[in-house]
Image (tube, rainbow, N blue to C red):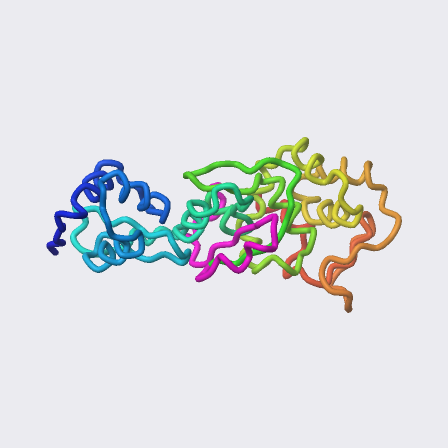
Amino acid sequence: MTRMISNSLAGILQELELERPLLVTRELLSDLKNKYHVASSVEVVAARLREKGWLLATDIQGVWEFIPAEVAGVYSTNDPLLSIRAFHAKYPTVKCALTFQTAAWIYGDSDRTPSDVYVSVEDYRYVRQLKGHVFVSVFRPNLSYKAISNVSVLARESVIVQMVVKPTSVPSWTSVQEWLPGFCAELLPEGVYEELADRSPFVSQRLGYLIQSMRPDIADEIYRNTKPKSNAWFGERKQSLRYDKRFMVADTHLPFDPGEMGKLI
């Protein structure tokens, strides 16, 4: 497929081809427009580039995917993380990171390429900015984010703690069962304890219950530090599926017995 280059946009396209950005923001287009003395507005420039097949829309307004000349048509990269990358491009200072199954995938503990992307943000104001197959939860970690494949992801220890802060927020515990043992094997004890700091003791009880057979070393330390004194619910308050006497956890939610998960490691 031949895509035409107008004389007025030649400079902009030449620079985009040299730099090969995956994403083009409104701010970048504005800078290039001024650099190459293009009189048209940014909106007009973007519209012309989209019309000629050089840009594709993303789920984030004001951010487009760049399609280089070598691509034989106006085809997206189909990057499953494109929406979150576009969000980062538009809001580089907003604290937002991959979590749950998507974090497990990018860490290499899950083989399933995500059709849905799960992210954690620290500010409710930005939840509605993420659309498409992006599902957002609000969580403020104690640990810093990691950077993997040019995208922010919660530390493993933050992910596992977020999962027990509100167990019903996890999209599929059945899927979690597949990658949880390998994920827990890589947990750093110091990171877990730091992530649990200043949180409700019920969070610690639920975490100890969840990882007791996969990481007994961490679970034992959680037990010594917490010394459970009252019941913690793992899920909604209803008839429990199982009750753990040690951590005093009434489990109404998990489709598996955490006490058996250690056999899968």
The magenta stretch spans residue 120: yes
Q: Is residue 50 left or right of residue 120?
A: left
Question: Which stretch is magenta?
Answer: 107-133
- Identify the residue at horizontal 78%, vertical 54% (top origin): 249
Q: Eyeballing the image, is 253 above or below 21?
A: below
> Residue at the spot x=77%, y=40% of the render?
198
On the picture, is 213 further left or further right than 147? right
Residue closest to the far bottom: 239
Location of residue 157 (image quadrant): top right
| Residue 129 locus on image (x, y percent) | 49, 57
Along the viewing direction, whichever of 209 and 141 lies nearer the viewer: 141
Which residue occupies the foreground of this view, 219 or 35?
A: 35
Q: Is residue 149 magenta?
A: no
- Is the N terminus in the top left, top right, bottom left or bottom right quadrant? bottom left
Which of these two is toward me, 185 or 235? 235
Q: Position of residue 124 (x, y in %)?
A: 61, 55
**Residue 107 spot, x, y in % from top left:** 48, 41
> Taking 173 as reference, is 16 above or below it?
above
Position of residue 185 relative to residue 47, above or below, is above
Specify the farthest residue to the right: 229
Q: Which residue of the protein is positioned furthest toward the front in this rendering?
A: 39
- The C terminus lies in quadrant: top right
Residue 260 seen in the figure: yes
Residue 51 locus on image (x, y percent): 21, 60
Badge count: 0
Horizontally, residue 113 falls left or right of residue 212, namely left
Residue at the image position 56 percent from the left and 53 percent from the top? 176
Q: Is residue 217 visible?
A: no
Q: Nearer the viewer, residue 69 or 63?
A: 63
Left or right: 19 with respect to 142?
left
